[in-house]
Amino acid sequence: MTETSTHLRGRCHKFGHEMHMDTKVMPYKYIHLHGFDAEKLVPHLFEDVAPGFHERAQPGDFIVAGRNFAFGKAHSQGLIAIASLKQRLLCESMPFNSYRGAISRGIVCHRRCTGITDLVNDGDTIEMDFATGVFTNVTTGATAQFDPVQRDLLDMMLVGGMRPMLAKWRDEHIRAA
């Protein structure tokens, strides 16, 4: 599934600060047990901080996190699970390698939403326009203005990540030839 609009709405799943990739996002032991098998990884996403997350998450929901989301080794298994569940991501900060991995997997995300965790509660309905940076908590009425996501990165996220973007580029160049 690829998104077409930059203005997206969904339910909020709130997490705190310092979400380590190999402990809080995806426990390290599953990296070796399940490799890159999304179906086997999904049940273990956030299992130590939000047991059963995968059962509550619906496609189009937002993961909202504080500072330093997915820090540590840039293992991709947590991101594979997030992408498989078709979650979007808003966080206050995220290391570059994790951000690059999220974009590559087609996770529509914004990593510079300073103070966002103060604007939401778990279960709120929220909206984000990634092209303009306008955030709205529909449940509470709170709003914020963040920087827009860079257009070429946003296009890659919306088309579904690196592979679909390259396939689209290839097809356009074949047609033009």
Image (spheres, rainbow, N blue to C red):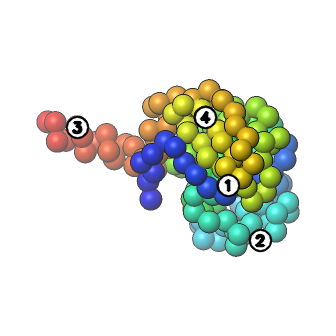
Nearer to us: label 1 or label 2: 1
The N terminus - image quarter: bottom left
Mark 4 is on which residue type?
Val
Q: Secondary structure at mark 4?
A: strand
First in sequence, mark 1 or 4: give its number. 1
Give the image location of residue 119, x and y in percent. Answer: 78, 42
Q: Is residue 26 visible?
A: no
Give the CA separation, mark 4 to mark 2. 31 Å
Camera-nearest label, 3 or 1: 1
Name the residue: 47% across, 30% down.
151
Residue kind at label 1, given as amino acid type = Thr
Q: Check disc 4 and report the residue beneath it.
A: 134
Callout 1: few (<14), some (14-19), or many (20+) C-alpha neighbours within 10 Å?
A: some
Tell me the number on the disc at residue 125: 1
Could you give the CA–CA distance between mark 2 and mark 3, rounded to whole angstroms?
Answer: 44 Å
User: What's the CA distance linking mark 1 and mark 2?
Assistant: 20 Å
Check disc 1 and report its element: helix, strand or loop.
strand
Give the spatial CA distance, label 3 vs label 1: 40 Å
Q: Earlier in the sequence, mark 4 or mark 3?
A: 4
